Amino acid sequence: MDINSEEHRLAIAPDIAKAYQLGREQKYIDAYNVLLPHFEAKEIPSCFEEPCGWTIYRYLKYNESKLSSREIRKILAFYLTFATCKPSTFHSCIMMQATNLEKKHENEFKFIEFCLMWKLDSLRTDDFLSAKGTTGNGKTIEYQSLAENVATRLYKELKSRHTEEFVNELFPFFLTVKEKCPDNRFIDMYIAQLFYWQGKIEESLSAYKAILRNSPEWYIWKSMGDIIDDNELRISFYCKALTMMGKDEFIGDLRLKLATLLLDSNKEQAAYEVEQYMKTYKENNWNISGDVYLLQGKLQGVMPSSQSKAFYRGNIEAAENYAYSDIPTGEFVFFELFKNQEGKERAKLTNTKKHLDIRIPVTPLLRKATLGEVFSIRLTKKNERLVPLTIHKTGKSLELKGKKVGSQDSSEIKTITGIVSLPAKGDFCFIDHTYYVPAKIRETNKLQEGQKVTAKVKQLPDGKWRVISIIGGK
């Protein structure tokens, strides 16, 4: 029988109407059960696909905790037989629900196959837009778009199921997400890894290098290390990641990989990595990988190293030189430690061409620096600001007379009164065309062209003056 014939539509209409009414009464299980025989017989007319689809969606949404992965796959398979609902708000709602279900039934759901059948090219423009919300304490948070959530779930599953067919079919979708969601901080890494799974090693390495210029996070160093063949270089990448690590619970896999590589060359450090892994996992009552016990057996009787941080720092330059081979280093002189207007600790370094203002938590090496000590630094530009990529001691030192670390001598600070002048471009300004006013100070004090102000200014190592605060004005 033709399921779209008028005879069939009239025959099935009473059940459609009944399910609709039960849905209005929030009896979602009853509504689904009314239509279940028709779903199983694949006899839903195209004109009834959307109302029947909403019955499926609500049944999943309000009963997901009671359903097994197998039941969920069966229910979504009913939906995927519908042909007329995409693209649409409803179609996107089904994908949203599937994404949530995949999180709860990880490694059981087969999300890749679902997405390929759902057809990712039927995502709407709105599905690539992030949204903002407010927490109970008034804090604003940003929620990823549906497309970004789908990319994240797909990438996670691809890590264990990256067949050539899957990677090639999904690659265009990841490129689309990169184009339409440029602020996503993970999509570039996903694409770099997809290149690797495609066997395009050079493209993958180039993509990772590009990420490390703008987002040198520990997990990028670790991920790039994973795809490098040379074991000594891989050790260097893992050490670089460990100098930048956050919480220990994120890096168990990294510690195990480093321990395995060090089994022959540095058993003490390998024992330390295993010890730290065991400590973290036991404290959190997590399941411990069988590989750890095998490593423990090979390291039996070895005393863990007590110089782990020195080991990491001593082994990072090979990774840095490889990742930043096309970025030259420059020598900068350590000038002072100070706190900015927000009370955050900073280090000031300078040479004849550039002046750097570096956050100490990012570069703790500078906390113990001595006045005049020379450092070799690689720089990149981010939001018009120079940001250090690598910092190393050179062993050199220059004598800077009349200066103490952290001091702001009265000979270098004075009070001036003058007229504000605004440049043609830029958010900064000047007082009397001589004293530089940073953008933040200009904005905070709402300085205007021709305004007369009194300010405290400080002389920089190159002899120029910089405003450090506005203390009066008209």
Image (cartoon, rainbow, N blue to C red):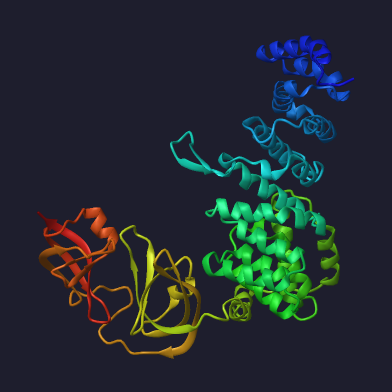
Determine the image quadrant of residue 317.
bottom right
Determine the image quadrant of residue 302.
bottom right
Instruction: In this rendered view, identify the residue nearer to me: 217 or 15.
Output: 15
Q: Is residue 204 left or right of residue 44?
A: left
Q: Residue at 38%, 65% (x, y): give it.
A: 345
Q: Residue at 58%, 43% (x, y): give it.
A: 145
Instruction: In this rendered view, identify the residue nearer to me: 89 or 369.
Output: 89
Q: Is residue 450 left or right of residue 294?
A: left
Question: Does residue 233 lie above or below 415 as drawn?
Answer: below
Q: Position of residue 58 (x, y in %)?
A: 70, 24
Question: Does residue 195 lie above or below 334 as drawn?
Answer: above
Q: Position of residue 269 (x, y in %)?
A: 71, 74
Q: Position of residue 447 (x, y in %)?
A: 19, 56
Q: Is residue 144 left or right of residue 437?
A: right
Q: Visible in this render: residue 104? A: yes
Quadrant in which the N terminus appears: top right
Q: Position of residue 167 (x, y in %)?
A: 76, 57
Q: Residue at 70%, 21% (x, y): give it.
A: 51
Quadrant in which the C terminus appears: bottom left
Q: Residue at 84%, 20% (x, y): give it.
A: 38
Instruction: In this rendered view, identify the residue nearer to me: 205 or 169.
Output: 169
Q: Is residue 44 left or right of residue 172?
A: right
Q: Visible in this render: residue 304? A: no
